[in-house]
Image (cartoon, grey):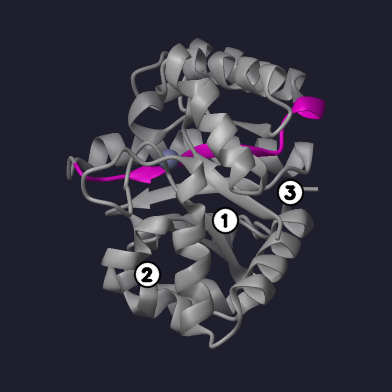
Amino acid sequence: MPLADVHCHLDLFNNEEIKEVIRRAQDAQLKAIITNGINPESNRKTLDLAKRFPLVRPALGLYPTDAIKLRGEEIEDELEFIQKNKDAIAAIGEVGLDNTAKDNGLLKRQGEILEKLIALSEKMRKPLILHTRKAEQEAIDMLESASVKNPLLHCFCGKLKLVRRAADNGYHFSIPAAIVRMEHFQKVVEMLPLPQLHAETDSPYLSPYKEQKNEPSFIIESVRKIAEIKSMTIEDTAGNLFMNYQKIFT
Ligand SMILES: [Zn+2]
């Protein structure tokens, strides 16, 4: 039963932890883990992890709240760095919009940077992994006007009306293992056809278990819940999800 975790942050585990985390992922039958960079430093760590562990595939990106701390030329340098690593990476991510600060000026700047990242993903023919907190509609507007194909909305917490709109556009959604305690994601899984679904952990964040740090081996919680909602066996669900992973992240 092959499994893939399409979104996590392995660079946030320390050097001692990481070997154990990868070993447990292997034992849990994970065949691929996409770890996401969020700024220049994390992008380099992400690439390094992928070199050390064959199971790990890197995505390089600029997280919206990190991106706005960079100067224009630093952004350009990082876009160039991402492009230089074209052959090594599975996707561009984590990128997106985050309006938790409720600041329209900052959101506008994030939008300008996201526009560049969208253009880069088109040019490089790499899928985009998006974070869209408190700016879900703005993000979908941007994806639609740029006609982005197959974006992956990670941990999408927008209203169900927006879920419907993104689903109708053919967008992909990755469902965190924390679905076991978050009803919103159970509804998202009900609404979406299986070919548009993926499983993620977002580890070390969003653990499915309250008192344990999240890690890729917990991905089975996501698969199990999707299987239950779709009335399928865990094996069938895992097989389909793995196929979805392969289709997007070739
Ligand atoms: Zn993330």
Q: Are marks 1 and 2 in contact (CB under 8 Å)?
A: no
Question: Label 1: which residue?
Answer: 152
Left or right: 168, with 112 as reference point: right
Residue type, mark 2 in image: Phe
Tell which of 87 and 190 is nearer to you.
Answer: 190
Give the mark toward the camera: 1 or 2: 2
Q: Quadrant of the N terminus?
A: bottom right
* Earlier-in-chain disc, 3 versus 1: 1
Pointer 3 or 2: first along the chain: 2
Badge 3 density bin: few <14, some 14–19, many ≥20, Cα 10 Å:
some
Q: CA distance from mark 1 to mark 2?
A: 15 Å
Camera-nearest label, 3 or 1: 3
User: x, y percentage for residue 14?
Assistant: 41, 16
Estimate the spatial distance between the alpha carbons at disc 3 and disc 2, rounded to whole Å. 22 Å
In the image, residue 97 lies in the stretch drawn in magenta: yes
Q: Quadrant of residue 19?
A: top right
Q: Name the spot of residue 44 as percent of width and height, x first.
A: 57, 14
**In the orientation shown, which residue stands out farthest toward the left?**
102
Image spot of residue 197 (x, y percent): 58, 68
**Disc 2 designates what residue?**
185
Question: Mark 3 highlights which residue?
Answer: 249
What residue is drawn where x is 19% and y is 40%? 103
- Callout 3 touching callout 2 (CB < 8 Å): no
The magenta-colored residue range is 86-100
